């Protein structure tokens, strides 16, 4: 069985197996006499219909113009922490095209990897870890559903990431028969690691090392890109308040200075009074076992270092100090 990276939403053109329209019309005619759409056909639909539509919307739509966005799997109003291979392949193909489109700010977050020894800023930049650190303002959601008729329906919507409200007058639907290779890809599901650290896929209490690596990577990139001269800057990681904390955020924060110190240009000092920047953590419990860990930096005079802060979502099942 041949899966050409099978992409879900890739739906052939209207003439082949379905009906896609900016007005969100859905083909309700019988498809019993039509040939099933294959993976390659879906990619054609992504290239010729979906990609141009998203490009146009983020260039001209009054709510979406100049907004940063990420493409995710959705079910109804929920962003899914898992993604099927069809949706994954649609997203990969869209990323290749949308990132070249003028004025389109697609966020393509790297997959978090275990920490590597002797990393430098150049290593991180080379591995594309410093790309797309801007906040995601809009989620473009791809929903795939098997219908009682045996057909596949693909729906594309957009939602404001903060207000959790649907973006008006945005959306594209397709419905039609698909081949066995597309169905196989639809059933191939994995965790969407590009969401790791965001609310849909928070870090867990048994991942303090990955959490520390995530924070160190983000902060190192922010220092490198946000400060004109960071080479002589000394960073003091304030761990004084960790003595009474035992949770995952405390464990990660206690590792953070060691991870940061591996970055050649980020210098760590154990002397608070000699430091240029004081790094502190702030943990906010937002309920249901979910916390937001915020890393903030201040100069010696107490003023905040603008643009050099990062946040991450963490879920814990234990009732312990964060």
Image (cartoon, rainbow, N blue to C red):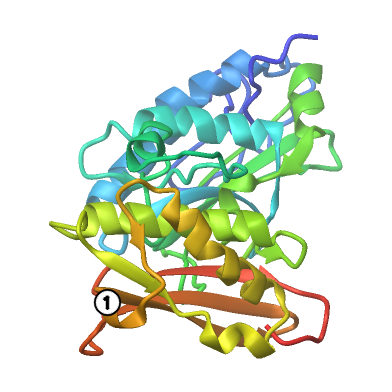
Vertically, is 242 above or below 203? below
268 to the left or right of 60: right
In this rendering, is residue 154 above or below 244?
above
Residue 82 is left or right of residue 130, and the answer is right
Residue 283, compared with residue 177, is above or below; it is below
Q: How many marks?
A: 1
Q: Is residue 193 above or below residue 8?
A: below
| Quarter of the view holding residue 269 | bottom left
Estimate the x, y position of residue 146 in percent, counting from the top left.
79, 40
Residue occupying the point 83% across, 80% down: 318
Q: Quadrant of residue 299?
A: bottom left
Residue furthest left in the image: 228
Q: Position of residue 256 (x, y in %)?
A: 52, 63
Residues packed near mark 1 inside 10 Å, few (<14), some (14 to 19) or many (20 plus)? few
Instruction: Kindly tell me whether residue 67 is visible in this rendering.
Output: no
| Residue 37, x across and y down, in percent | 67, 19
The image position of residue 180, as x and y in percent, is 81, 19
Q: Name the residue nearer the viewer: 268 or 256.
A: 268
Report the residue at 77% width, 62% height from top.
Answer: 206
Q: Give the residue at the far top of this rendering.
A: 1
Quarter holding the N terminus is top right
Q: Nearer the viewer, residue 23 or 170?
A: 170
Q: In which quadrant of the rendered image does the C terminus lie?
A: bottom right
Horizontal relation, residue 258 to residue 28: left or right:
left
Mark 1: secondary structure: helix
Q: Which residue is mark 1?
A: 274
The residue shown at (71%, 72%) is 315
Who's the residue at 41% across and 28% down the image?
A: 96
Residue 141 appearing in the image: yes
């Amino acid at each position: 069985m041949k899966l050409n990276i099978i992409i879900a939403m890739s739906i052939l053109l209207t003439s082949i197996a379905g009906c896609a329209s900016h007005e969100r019309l859905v083909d309700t005619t019988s498809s019993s006499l039509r040939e099933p759409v294959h993976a390659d056909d879906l990619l054609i639909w992504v290239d010729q219909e979906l990609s141009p539509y998203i490009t146009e919307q983020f260039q001209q739509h009054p709510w979406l113009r100049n907004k940063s966005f990420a493409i995710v799997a959705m079910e109804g109003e929920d962003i899914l922490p898992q993604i099927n291979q069809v949706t994954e392949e649609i997203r990969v193909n869209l990323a290749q095209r949308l990132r070249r489109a003028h004025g389109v700010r697609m966020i393509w977050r790297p997959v978090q990897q275990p920490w590597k020894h002797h990393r430098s800023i150049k290593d991180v930049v080379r591995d594309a870890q410093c790309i797309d650190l801007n906040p995601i303002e809009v989620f473009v959601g791809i929903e795939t559903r098997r219908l009682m008729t045996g057909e596949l329906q693909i729906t594309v919507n957009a939602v404001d990431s903060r207000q959790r409200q649907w973006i008006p007058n945005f959306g594209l639907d397709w419905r039609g028969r698909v081949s066995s290779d597309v169905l196989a890809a639809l059933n191939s599901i994995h965790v969407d690691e590009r969401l790791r650290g965001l609310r849909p896929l928070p870090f867990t209490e048994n991942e303090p090392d990955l959490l520390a690596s995530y924070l160190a990577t983000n902060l190192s990139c922010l220092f490198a890109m946000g400060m004109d001269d960071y080479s002589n800057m000394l960073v003091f990681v304030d761990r004084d308040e960790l003595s009474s904390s035992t949770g995952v955020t405390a464990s990660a924060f206690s590792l953070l200075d060691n991870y940061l110190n591996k970055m050649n240009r980020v210098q760590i000092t154990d002397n608070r009074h000699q430091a240029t920047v004081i790094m502190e953590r702030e943990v906010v419990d937002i309920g249901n076992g979910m916390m937001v860990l915020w890393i903030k930096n201040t100069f010696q005079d107490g003023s905040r270092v603008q643009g050099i802060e990062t946040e991450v979502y963490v879920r814990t099942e234990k009732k312990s100090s964060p």
